[in-house]
Image (cartoon, coloured by chain):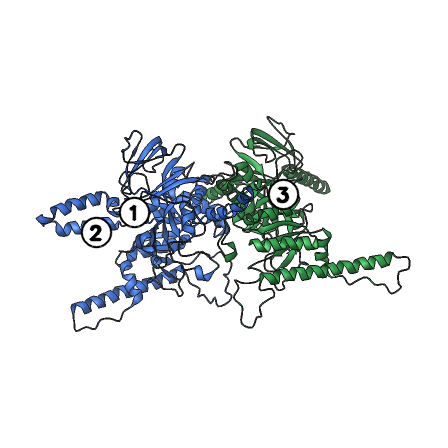
Amino acid sequence: MKPISTNKIINAHKIAKIWFSPLISLILAGLVVLALFPAASYASNQSSRVRAIINVKIVPVIGQPLESGSIIIKDGLIADLGSNLSIPPEAKVIDAKGLTAYPGMIDGYSSLGLVEISGVAATVDNRETGRINPQVKAIEALRYDSMHIPIARANGIVAALVAPSGGLIAGQSTLIKLSGWTNRQMAIKESFAMVVELPQIRSGRRSFRGFGGQQPEVTTEKALDELRELFHQARMYEKRRQAARNNLLLPLPEFDETSHFLLPVVKGELPVIFSVHGDQDIIQLIKFVKEEKIKAIFYGVEQGFKVAREIKEAGIPCLIGSLYGLPPVWEDGYDSLFLNPVILNQAGVKIAFSSSSSSSAKDLPYHAAKAAAFGLDRTEALKAVTIYPAEIFGVDDLMGSLEPGKLANIVLANGDLLELGTKIEKVFIEGQEIDLSNRYTELLEKFQKREQEKQL
Amino acid sequence: MRNKLIKTLLISSLLIFLISSATSLQANGNLLIKKATILTVSGPAIPEADVLVIDGLIKQIGQNLSAPPGTRIIEASGKYLMPGIIDTHTHIALHGTNEGTDAVTPEVNMATVINADDTSIFTALTGGVTMVHTMHGSANVIGGQNVVLKLKWGKPSEELVVKEAFPTLKFALGENVKQSNRTLLPGRPQRYPATRMGANALIRRELNRAKDYLDEWDRYEKLKKSKNPPATLLPPRRDLRLETLADLLRGKLVARCHAYVATEMVEFLNLAKEFGFKIGAFEHAWEAYKIVDELKAAGVGLSVFIDSWAYKMEAAEGIAYNAAYCTNQGLLVSINSDSGERIRRLFNEAGKAVKYGITQDEAIKLITINAAKQLGVDHLVGSIEAGKQADLALFNNHPMSAYARCDMTIIEGEVYFDREKILKERQEAAAKKGGK
């Protein structure tokens, strides 16, 4: 499945409308350029400074690695990269000898900016009360100055999907870059997808139903029936509204918040990220998605390996849940969470790794490496934190690899990007060099002063 | 007829003997591991070397070693052998962790609630862990006594206990014991203490009581030994709660204190000085990097997370540099899991410390020899040296690499986890299923 690229859809739409107008041929030409280089329009307000990273090993993810080359950054984009480039005289040169350039990583699923200190309710904004919340938008609560964002950035992560959580319909996720001075500035796609959470796999043990936790026993079947009904209501709501628009004698239907915000979903304009876990649940969900004609992305997918062929045939990409977990069912084998992405990848399913976290979002590369330890091809592991999430989120024309015309989201590392001991020396987001200081470094420096004072 | 019976009996007993001797051969702790890179921890790594294990002990490390006939040989070319991983703070393999109904419960002992069937034991083995310090929880200020176990999966609980380890007593401070993150049930009063002041005062009160208790016994013993003991002399009433605390004051028990913020650690150090007891380590110790001088002066170790932080207020200044920085300042640091899940990737957690300022060789110590020292078993385990117990873990890559996978875990020369065997069993099961 090729997910939507908003830019391309808008451009095509405009082109169709203005085709017969001779006056606008110049604009048409401009649009064609934009269609070819969407990153140019996206980054038009970026730094116009020219930079050249030289003597750098390049792992572009798309294309062959280069042992030593240069990358030219201009207007926030990668202007060029290669081994024998002439450096523009106005360029600020960064000698990166001994370092490797990678595209910045993209976290496939996180709570960055929504959860600050998980145990302190005042700092938690990812979980609305109630079960049906299509109206809530992650972007509108995003804490741009979260202490977790600079830490993730300092580990080479430049973009993330931020998802709300809880209930059946958790709300609207947002796709953000990890820089910007307001929440809105961070948005790549303000509302990327609706998040729907299906029940977890029952591991045999009864779930805790203590204080006030009178949770109804919800099966995936029941949950999908409920969704089907909600989608049906949304379609009927739209019909009634349409009818009232066409006939002034008909009363407008009363505003129905749930239907209103589910409309883009049932129209197939807004994808749905389904948090789904068990193999049989996945099978049911594939059928549901087909019937309801929903643009779907799966998240979690712990037992996906059992139905990898079906997922592949359905063409649904998978955001792999955190590998910091245990197999949901003992019989799956101790290593099933680690083998799952390997088997999905080998079956041809498009996968992306996720931190599923805010306070350990920085660990994204280690999830990919963990799968590699259990057999995932290392280049595939790297793709699953760069170009694959970019493709799944429909922004592969902007990011996910080092290619001319893409945003200059570049990480300079002193070793393998996914390795535990590797230090990230520099990060560029849209050509802008990012300050890598963060809560960790600031507190360390503050208390290192105690040692330094002794030397004075 | 009778002859036949005797014959059958003879044959079957012979068979039983053969089988039992064969299994004992397999399980008597003799192994020869060949051509692995040996991460000795006590010294530099030895490339392509053999390790010979006899009767559960490391007999010899060297090139081209030979073994007595019948010894199991493990081909480990291209692999990395490290000492078995030691987790200094877990709650696995227990039937219950918190006697939290009272703020003071030193009389409870985790050794009495060992659960040898806990699948977390197997989970831990799959990550190369061979020994755990499994502890009372942090629900109360003075918790229970902890126990050190070897993860001999399948063996009865008595065989898991490491008797040589320091006997330890759990203390806890901060948010958990003052119950600041707990919603009170209607009608349930708040437990004392509800502040850090109260927690400290409570420890002081209990230790003063224990001091008096010791005194009472001393007075009794003196009178008993005197020339003319009074006819009415009776021993003091034995109090198991105070008895345990008295053992702490006698130096027979070592305190392990769950603490996060700098102030509570400084104050616990003061209490230790005031009452003269030993602190084995601070658990979690997220703000240790702020008080390195005080910790160094007291010679207290740290059992910490590498970067699991910001889950509550007192963990909001927990920086991933803590372990590496404190190591570089000369403190004895171990990395713990505190989790039946994180335990299987404890080697990854240690590996992360490299990013924050120590070498791979130092990082590996955080989960081996440093942990062994903190538990008082460094003369037995924690490094690969001749004479030590053969607790070993075999990895496909350097265990401090993100690409590392544990392939085999050995305790006292017995193989408790063998990935290859599991894969083979899976294949056989799949073939059986496919054949039907």
Q: Mark 3 points at which residue?
A: B372
- The answer to which quarter of the image holds residue A99 is top left
- For label 1, count other residues whose C-alpha is less than 10 Å away and answer few (under 14), some (14-19) or many (20+): many
Chain under callout 3: B
Chain under callout 2: A
Residues under numbered marks 1 and 3 in contact, where contact means CB atoms less than 8 Å apart: no
Q: Where is residue A60 in the image (x, y as percent from the top left)?
A: 34, 37
Does label 3 lie on the same chain as label 1?
A: no
Which chain gets the green colouring? B
**Residue B301 in sight from this viewpoint:** no
Q: Is mark 1 on a helix, strand or loop?
A: loop
Looking at the rendered structure, the kind of residue marked 1 is Val
- The answer to which quarter of the image holds residue A68 is top left
For image coordinates 9% across by 50% down, the residue present is: A21
Looking at the image, tell me whether mark 1 or mark 2 is earlier in sequence order: 2
**Residue A288 in sight from this viewpoint:** yes
Which chain gets the blue colouring? A
Q: Distance between the residues labelled 1 and 3?
A: 50 Å
Q: Distance between the residues labelled 3 and 2?
A: 64 Å
Q: Mark 1 points at which residue?
A: A395
Residue farthest toward the top in the current orientation of the protein: B64
Q: What element carries label 3?
A: helix
Q: Where is residue B30 in the image (x, y as percent from the top left)?
A: 64, 35
Give A291 or A268, whichever is nearer the viewer: A268
Q: Position of residue B70 (x, y in %)?
A: 63, 32
Q: Position of residue B172 (x, y in %)?
A: 60, 57
Q: Mark 2 points at which residue?
A: A10
Q: How many marks?
A: 3
Chain under callout 1: A
Looking at the rendered structure, the kind of residue marked 3 is Ala
Give B395 or B33, whichever is nearer the viewer: B395
| Quadrant position of the C terminus of chain A in the picture | top right
